[in-house]
Image: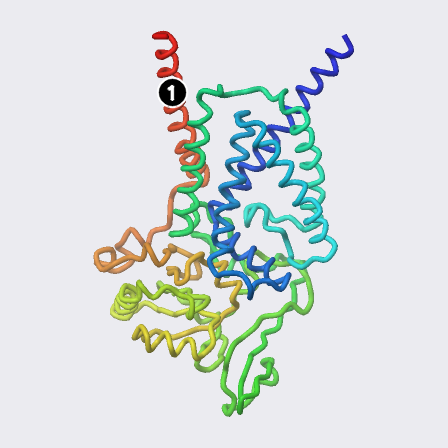
Amino acid sequence: MENNYIHRIKIVWTNLCRFVLALVFIFSGFIKANDPQGTYYKIEDYLQAFGLLDYTPEFLPLFGSILLAVVEFTLGVFLFFGIRRKLTTISLLGFMLFMTPFTLYLAVMNPVSDCGCFGDAIILTNWETFWKNIFFLIAAISVFKWSGLMIRIISKKSQWLISLYTLLYISAIALYCVSYLPIFDFRPYHIGANIIESMRIPQGEKPSVYESLFVMEKNGERKEFTLENYPDSTWTFIDTKVILKEKGYEPPIHDFSLYSAETGEDITKQILTDKGYTFLLVANRLDKADDGYIDLINEIYDYSVENGYAFYCLTSSLKEDMEQWRERTGAEYPYCTADDITLKTIIRSNPGLVLMKDATIINKWSCRSLPDEYDLSDRLDKLSLAQMETQTLQNKILLVVAWFAIPLFIFTMLDKTLIDRLEKRK
């Protein structure tokens, strides 16, 4: 009687651990597939912190980002349905045995600010990540030890279909989002966000103190200057940096500062207080920007000039890179310098285009989905592309779940029907 009671507890505990791990891995994998560029930047941060970035092939961080998303999501689905138990439980245990001591190192040494496990959807400190992994390690050990107690949801005969469709689905999501933009935008610069409102400090809160540093060059010598000791015109402007001097309350947007590349003047207020439409071409690194769409970008700039709309190119590139881009593309638009991380946060495309009005983000396009002359056939206030997205978060979630669940259900039913017919014939 006692052994039977203990056996039941093991079944309940194993399946509880199994479903918790499954949901976490499915969520984590999907979030990474939704924003492969974000995970790519985080992997670059890790490589930079460990001094390995210069020795890593350029394609590897992005490839690793997509691979990690596919592996996590697939393992989560396998665990949820209770299929390929041996492979899944061994893989999960190995994953947690690696990640737990690794996150302990991150918590103690703090080489990066957060692990990036759940992207921008849920940001955990390194210590929070470590304690989370302690629980998940215990769960992974339990599932591995008592894998035979996991209740199957799908039969062995149909598991190949689940496996194949899961891999195709999550790979398609990742490739779509890396080619265009994330389906779900959890960053503060999402469509509908008002930058001025997002920069405000609630009454009574003490703000963080930042300082802008200007990198200038003269006679081959580079120095950093503040606004208070900005040098004379004999110095050439190279770059700008924003550093945190004193930690305080941080609003969702706290590092949006734009400077004229020509004069070094802060023009943030001028751009944000413009009541009309403003196009922002965001290219954090012009030397690595895709110039295959430059003709289309130049057409959009010409359209903005003809209709009296402001157009700026935001970049963190050096001045010589700006000049090379101008010579290579024939670009005539003005440049603004901004923090590299800020630009990567605004849009996951290099280059990407943002449409803003009265400090509110109206629309965003990757370089692969830029509006063309047919889209820009009239003034913006008469075009649908200048209307904010109306699809709610709930609708998006339902759509994404439906694209996974409905085909999976149909394929499984067809497979089951076919198998039943074959068995009857036998």
Residue drawn at 41 percent across, 62 percent down: 350
Name the residue nearer the viewer: 145 or 257.
Answer: 145
Quick check: 405 left or right of 301? right
Dot 1: element = helix
Residue drawn at 44 percent across, 22 percent down: 158
User: From what the image shows, is residue 316 above or below residue 58?
Assistant: below
User: From what the image shows, is residue 213 above or below residue 391?
Assistant: below
Residue 247, given in percent of the width and then of the height, sits at 68, 63
Please, which residue is most extreme toward the right here? 2
Residue 379, given in percent of the width and then of the height, sits at 25, 60
Residue drawn at 65 percent across, 57 percent down: 113
Residue drawn at 34 percent across, 73 percent down: 333
Question: Total number of numbered labels?
Answer: 1
Quick check: 114 left or right of 197? right
Residue 370, given in percent of the width and then of the height, sits at 31, 57
Q: How is the image coloured?
A: rainbow
Name the residue nearer the viewer: 26 or 123.
Answer: 26
Q: Quadrant of the C terminus?
A: top left
Q: Quadrant of residue 295?
A: bottom left
Q: Quadrant of residue 413?
A: top left
List the residue tagged with mark 1. 415
User: From what the image shows, is residue 2 above or below residue 263?
Assistant: above
Q: Quadrant of the N terminus?
A: top right
Residue 425, given in percent of the width and then of the height, sits at 34, 8
Q: Quadrant of residue 303?
A: bottom left
